[in-house]
Structures are given as C-alpha cells and as structure tokens.
C-alpha cells in the first residue's frame, strides 16, 4: 500500500510540474508560481523518501524478520540491522528474547485430589525457524504453548501423590515438565530454557493432613535413628565385653601354664633336696656304710650301700 501511495504521489508531482508553466502563463502571479513549486518539491521529496524506505527495513536488536511477498513466505530470516527487501514485500518481526510464561494450572494427584499449581516456563524462539513458526503457527505462539503446557503438567502430576507434589518430588516434577515440553516445542522452533514449579495450592484440610503425616514420618525416622544408635552402642559394648573376656581367658591360661611350670620345677627341687638330706643323714650315721660315687643322671649322688 505504501508503495502504491508513493507511486501516485510521484505521478501527481510530475503532472503538477508539467502543468506549472501553463498556470504561470495564464495567471502569471508570483504567489501561484511559489505555491506550485513548493507543492511539487514536497511531493517529489515524499515520493523519493517512500520509495527509498520501501527497499529497506530496519530490524531491531532482539528480533528477527520474516519476509512475506504477495502471500509467499520466504525461508530467509532477516537479522537485526538494515536489510534490503523488495518494495512488494512486508516484514513480520519476531522477538528472540527470553520469555517467562506464568500459569496457574488446576490438576489432580494420583489419589484424585484437586491441586492448583503455579508454574513458569522460560523459553525463546529459535531465530532460524522464525519463518516456519510464522507459516505454521502465526504471530501469536502463546496459545499453542499454553495448551501444551497445561496438558503436560496434568499428565505428569497424575502419577504422583499429593504429598509428593507438595513436598519432596517438586523438583523432580519440574524436571519432567522441562523434558516433556522440550520434546514437544523444540520441533516447532522454540527452545525451552527452564520450567519452575513455584507454588502448590491444595485444600486447607488436606494440607494439614499432609503436614501431620510428614511430621509423623519425620518423628518416626528420628526415633529409628535413635534406636539404631542405641543398638550400635549396645553392640559396641557387647563386642568390647567379649574381647575383654577373651583377653582375661588368655591371661588366665597363661597364668595357669606358668603356675604348672613353676609347680613342676618346685617338685623336682624338693625331691633333690630330700635326697640330699637323706644322703647327709646316711653320712652322719655311724653304722651305715655308704659309698658315694659321682652323680645320678638326675643330678643326685649315686649311693652304694655295703651288705653285712
């Protein structure tokens, strides 16, 4: 349309310039000549300006341009900066900046409990696929993304209990949502950066019951920890007592063996002492005739008594 206006303006300026001499010859006032010259000049400047800017387009930073010519979409994407185009073309601009889509989704848990989830999806358009997005989706992609977003979160939460969604499985659910949306949106030309499960809203009574259950489980785990610690302490004391008993047994066996050796040694010494005493008495006796020759193999004197 702008190109047609520029052409018409140029034709008017040209026709006006041709007829200017006729007007001045007929009326010949200076004011008419000045007005005619001014109008013709302005028309020419406007026409030239519009013609020049119909051949170029400025794409701002953070956007890309898709060229459409007479209903046909070009696969070439215009990058930020000055780009030359056909005067019969129009440019549709798409933002490539990161977008943060926030939604409150009503869903259900595996037990059938109703939940409201505040979720966020951070995504951006892939510049090289802007033309495909324009042809297949249009200039407003949020509608299709929101519908897939809601469907994915409902499908995922149906596999979890309300307690898990409210508590320890929140990060896992967000990660599964990210993976699911990446598989669905990447082929369409969108890059999923992150998905966040910001808030879980459940009925107050159910929330209280879940909280009480969590506290009971924590108390049970704490008691189990205390019991395990006591059991470990008892096992340690039992092992310690067992080792002490074994030590005492070994010590007692050692003492008994030592006493046995000492007893045997003392018995031999006593025998020798008695033998020596007997020998001494024989030697002191006036009636006995005893000949002492050497020593017996046990170390005692060998005595021979003369028969009468």
Image: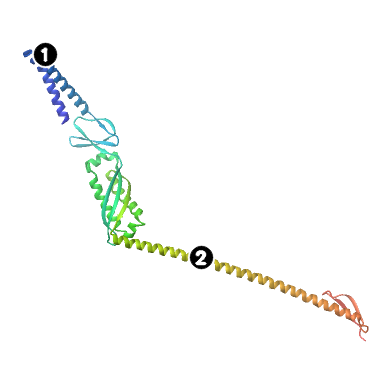
Front residue of 189 and 160: 160
Q: Is residue 91 above or below residue 25?
A: below
Which residue is tagged 2?
A: 232
Quarter of the picture holding the N terminus: top left
Q: Residues within 10 Å of mark 2 (few under 14, many from 20)?
A: few
Residue that appears at 77% across and 76% down: 267
Front residue of 150 and 136: 150
Q: CA distance from mark 2 to mark 1?
A: 116 Å
Q: Is residue 306 above or below residue 297?
A: below
Residue 161, can we see it? no
x then y, percent, for residue 43:
15, 22
Q: Which residue, as the protein is rendered here, is positioned at the far bottom?
A: 308
Which residue is tagged 1?
A: 30
x then y, percent, for residue 104:
26, 51
Q: Element under label 2?
A: helix
Residue 121, can we see it? yes
- The numbered mark at residue 254 is none
x then y, percent, for residue 106:
25, 55
Q: Element under label 1?
A: helix
Give the quadrant of residue 261: bottom right
Residue that appears at 25% across and 47% down: 145
Q: Is residue 180 above or below residue 257?
A: above
Residue that appears at 35% across and 63% down: 213
x then y, percent, for residue 46:
18, 24
Q: Residues within 10 Å of mark 1 (few under 14, many from 20)?
A: few
């Amino acid at each position: 349309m702008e190109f047609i206006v520029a052409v018409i303006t140029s034709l008017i300026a040209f026709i006006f310039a041709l007829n200017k001499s006729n007007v001045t010859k007929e009326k010949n006032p200076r004011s008419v000549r000045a007005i005619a010259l001014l109008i013709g000049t302005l028309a020419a400047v406007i026409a030239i300006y519009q013609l020049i800017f119909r051949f170029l387009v400025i794409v701002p930073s953070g956007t890309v341009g898709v060229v459409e010519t007479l209903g046909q979409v070009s696969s070439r994407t215009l990058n930020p900066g000055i780009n030359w185009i056909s005067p019969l073309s129009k440019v549709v601009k798409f933002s490539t900046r990161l977008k943060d889509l926030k939604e409150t989704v009503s869903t259900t848990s595996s037990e059938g409990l109703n939940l409201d989830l505040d979720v966020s999806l951070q995504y951006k358009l892939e510049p090289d696929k802007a033309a495909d997005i324009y042809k297949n989706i249009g200039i407003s992609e949020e509608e299709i993304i929101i519908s897939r977003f809601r469907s994915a979160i409902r499908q995922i939460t149906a596999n979890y209990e309300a307690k898990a969604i409210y508590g320890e499985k929140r990060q896992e659910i967000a990660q599964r949502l990210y993976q699911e949306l990446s598989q669905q949106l990447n082929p369409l030309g969108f890059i999923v950066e992150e998905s966040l499960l910001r808030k879980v809203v459940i009925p107050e009574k159910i929330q209280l019951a879940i909280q009480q259950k969590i506290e009971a489980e924590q108390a049970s785990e704490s008691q189990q920890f205390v019991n395990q610690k006591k059991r470990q302490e008892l096992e340690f004391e039992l092992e310690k007592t067992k080792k002490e008993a074994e030590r005492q047994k070994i010590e007692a066996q050692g003492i008994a063996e030592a006493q046995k050796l000492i007893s045997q040694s003392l018995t031999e010494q006593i025998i020798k002492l008695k033998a020596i005493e007997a020998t001494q008495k024989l030697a002191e006796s006036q009636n006995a005739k005893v000949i002492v020759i050497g020593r017996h193999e046990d170390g005692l004197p060998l005595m021979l008594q003369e028969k009468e």
